[in-house]
Image (cartoon, rainbow, N blue to C red):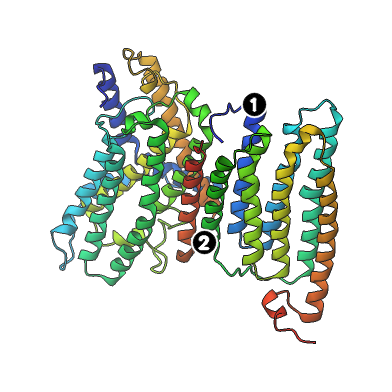
Amino acid sequence: MSGVPFFSSMGWLHVILGFIVLTDLSLLAAEHRRVCIRLIALQGMLLGALPLLMHTGETAIYPWVVAAIFFGTKGILLPWLLWRTMKQLPFSAMRPYVGSTVCVLIGLCGFMLSLWLAGRLGLTFNALFSQVFPTSFTTIFAGLLLIVTQRTALNQIFGYLVLENGIYLLNVPMIQYENLWLELSILLDILVGIFVMGIAVLHIYRVFESTDVDRFAVLRD
Amino acid sequence: MIKPYPAQYCASIACLLLSLLLAPLLFGIINRVKAKVAGRQGRPLLQLYFDINKLLRKNSVYPQTSTRFFRIAPVAGVAAALAALLMLPFGGVPAVLSFPGDFIVMPALLAFSRYMLILAALDTGSAFEGMGAARESLFSAMAEPILIFCLMVLAYASREYSLSLILGGLPATLWLAEWPMYLLLAIALFLLLLVENSRIPVDDPNTHLELTMIHEVMILDHSGPDLALLEYSASLKLWIFCLIISGIAIPQAGVWGFAERSSPAGSFPSFALEAGTMLLMILCIAALVGCVESAMARLRLERVPQVLTLAGSFACLAALSLWR
């Protein structure tokens, strides 16, 4: 992260990657749903800007189109869907299985592990890939942690989305070869997934008057 | 060890005197910012100077149960803070006292000052002050390792073991090369400043509600010159934290610092420029504390460890940013 001049493309890339790690840790520490959704929106916007910094190909319009798609979908559309779902649910405090302090410490350990892994794996085929790998792995780790530590279905969707952000980050260096179609198709699946999950969570709430996954385990026909 | 030139030595002494003189002003700035944000006129900027002057002209009253610890604590607090200040550079101006390993001694002196205050609070025999002492020792036990860790990261980054070389006049080239670390450490140290100096959102210096007090409850039985010394040592401690943060948050011209320590002493304008920049930064940090106090409410006691976790996380991220 250090040793790079501030006013350079790589310097800005490191700033954004640093902010993404901070949003990961903030998501692990967040105790309100609205804060989580805002952080996910911020993370989505940061991720959406990455193709502009990484593109080295010949087509000038390509990175702008890709950035606009990801910025709009990850930074605006998906958070808006989550916000709409949250508004229709009653207010309830996030009660994770593991406290936020412990979650942040585990997240830091995950970041440390990802830095160690990046050094051990010797990712030399793409210089950008080795730059984004620690942040990407940390984001995937934070997403998984959110999924397993959260008690309610909506909060688990946050984890699912953060997990996908990490996978997207692994794929962003492919922008150099103007080859992001796989990620675009995944994004479409995620978009539909979040849409369906939002509706499903609402139906679950209307039928069972709760979205607590602990209560799902004791449901009977 | 740094061997300052005579002119540098004079500059160090001048900066030390400046620190001793201006330290109480920080509380005035914080209170003035809070008052302005709340739409009030507020107390005078020099209120703490007036308070200290008034207290010094009074007599001290001691509880019947107290022993010599109660009398020694205020003097020890000022002495420890003064000794810590001797080791801190003022921007590019080297510290008056500098030796390898002083970055460990400085936090130890602050811890000693707090230890004496806790002893004095317990010495009164009051359960109320004992409660404050317990809280203070609990939070400081979590905050001090983070402070030492921050200084260790700085020492590792600069490959130096003296605060004058670690903090003194960071050249712009070094700062720009390692800016994520310096920025993250500055945030961590700012959070530690709030905890160590009992500021909102950790503690409210204006409250006297027994359920929420931490620092103020420990000095309730002090009066007269003793209370004046305690107030002054608290302002010195705040100044010390502001000085550390200023040292790492802004790159210096490096005229008097280690960047060009092999060169002859700088001119008076360069000294004035460096000292002026640092002074401005210190006052800005005090104003920032005032803004934070205006914007936030005091946290519940059980949430204070979360602030320390946040500070520790920023310090860890700063250390990880050095990962090659």
Label 1, secondary structure: give it: loop
Question: Residue A102, which numbered label?
Answer: 2
Find residue A6 and report its horizontal and vertical position in percent: 59, 28
- Quadrant in which the N terminus of chain B is drawn: top left
Amino acid of disc 2: Val
Q: Chain of mark 1?
A: A
Lateral position of residue A57 relative to residue A110, left or right: right
Outermost residue, bottom side: A221
Regarding residue A16, the answer to whether it shows in the image is no
Residue B92 found in image quarter: top left
Say which chain tag 2 marks: A
| Quarter residue B106 falls in | top left
Residue A140 against residue B102 in the figure, above or below: below
Q: Mark on residue A127?
A: none
The residue closer to the viewer here, B99 or B283, is: B99
Q: For the residue carrying disc 1, how many other residues have a C-alpha within 10 Å: few (<14), some (14-19), or many (20+)?
A: few
Report the Cα–Cα distance between label 1 and label 2.
36 Å
Left or right: where B188 falls relative to B128: right
Which label was assigned to residue A8?
1
In the image, is A144 to the left or to the right of B106? Answer: right
Discs 1 and 2 lie in a common subunit: yes
Percent across and percent down for residue A105 are 51, 56
Depicted A178 relative to depicted A212: above or below: above
